[in-house]
Amino acid sequence: MKANLRWLTPYLFLAPALLVLGITVFWPAAQAFYLSFTRYGYDITQPPDWVGLENFQLLLKDRIFWKTLKNTLIYLVGVVPILAIAPLVLAILVNQKLRGVRWFRVAYYTPVVISMVVAGIAWRWLYAENGLLNQLLQWVTRSNLSLPWLTSPNFALYSVMAVTVWKGLGYYMVIYLAGLQGIPNDLYEAAAIDGSDGWRRHWDITLPLMRPYIFLVAVISAIAATKVFEEVFIMTRGEPRSSSKTVVYYVYEQAFQDLDMSYACTIGLVLFLVILALSLIRLKCAPASPETLL
């Protein structure tokens, strides 16, 4: 009898975690999916009214939604390549056996542990009309040039993207650093014998073996870019003229400012499908593990 019930053992270990996930993740997600087909939010004392695909039809005609989706795609295309390449270069630099290199690792990682609220406020001061960046710009150009970093539709989104890059460099550098330290030195020594030295050895040895990590960082940073919110909320509130408004911020705006919960759930469902697609790409197209490549 005990042998027949042995198959229950792993599920008993999983049960507490599944219960917590069910209450905090799966059930709210199911409710959000249901609400996307209803009209609910203006008066939360009233039950949701089933409206079918009406919210999705409104979404197709929503000019602001398409603008936020475009901004999110710009964010994705602009941030992901930088966060996939620049941290790898930093990881290679701080992986050298040099005196004081640990201090450089700490310096590059420090932005990661800084709260986004603190970082956003600090960068908002830096971007101010009389902030440090404009003062440096005036000093370099010897003029009264002052750029509207956060107040111009042409600059606002890219200024916020710069903060995301600054905040993420150290985090992805650590991932790459873990991968670099797993590459045997024998491979570099063999490459040096064959005439591959200096930066050439990184092209011949490091990049091929780091492909799984590069792909992982690209997918993680892509998912993070589609869900960006704090930077926008703290620095621009999606302005001017919705030029820096992202999909997640639009969900927040619809749910907690306009109190249209059902429409916010509809937008959230579309965002979920985009993130799901990125996750499936990660599972389908992930390269071989470093151990396989070795």
Image (cartoon, rainbow, N blue to C red):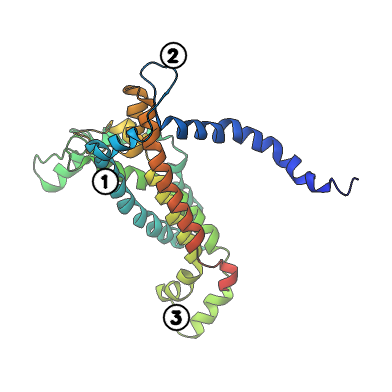
User: Mark 2 falls on what kind of element?
Assistant: loop
**Type of amino acid at the residue the image marks with label 1:** Lys
**Type of amino acid at the residue the image marks with label 2:** Thr
User: Mark 3 falls on what kind of element?
Assistant: loop
Marks 2 and 3, how far apart in space? 71 Å
Classify the position of the C terminus by image quarter.
Answer: bottom right
On the image, numbered disc 1 is attached to which residue?
A: 70
Precedes in sequence: disc 2 or disc 3: 2
**Which residue: 47% across, 66% down?**
211
Count residues near mark 3 (Cα–Cα under 10 Å), then give few for <14, some for 14-19, many for 20+: some
Q: Looking at the image, which is closer to me, 162 or 15?
A: 15
In this view, the mark in front (3 or 1): 1
**Which residue: 50% across, 80% down?**
191
Can you say whether 68 is above or below 108 in the image?
Answer: above
**Which residue: 44% across, 13% down?**
45
Marks 1 and 2, how far apart in space? 35 Å
Q: Is residue 108 visible?
A: no
Outermost right residue: 1
On the image, numbered disc 2 is attached to which residue?
A: 45
Residue 156 placement, left or right of 105: left
In this view, the mark in front (2 or 3): 2
**Type of amino acid at the residue the image marks with label 3:** Ser
In which quadrant of the rendered view does residue 148 lie? top left
Q: Looking at the image, which is closer to me, 116 or 129?
A: 116
Q: Looking at the image, which is closer to me, 107 or 162?
A: 162
Can you say whether 214 is above or below 145 in the image?
Answer: below
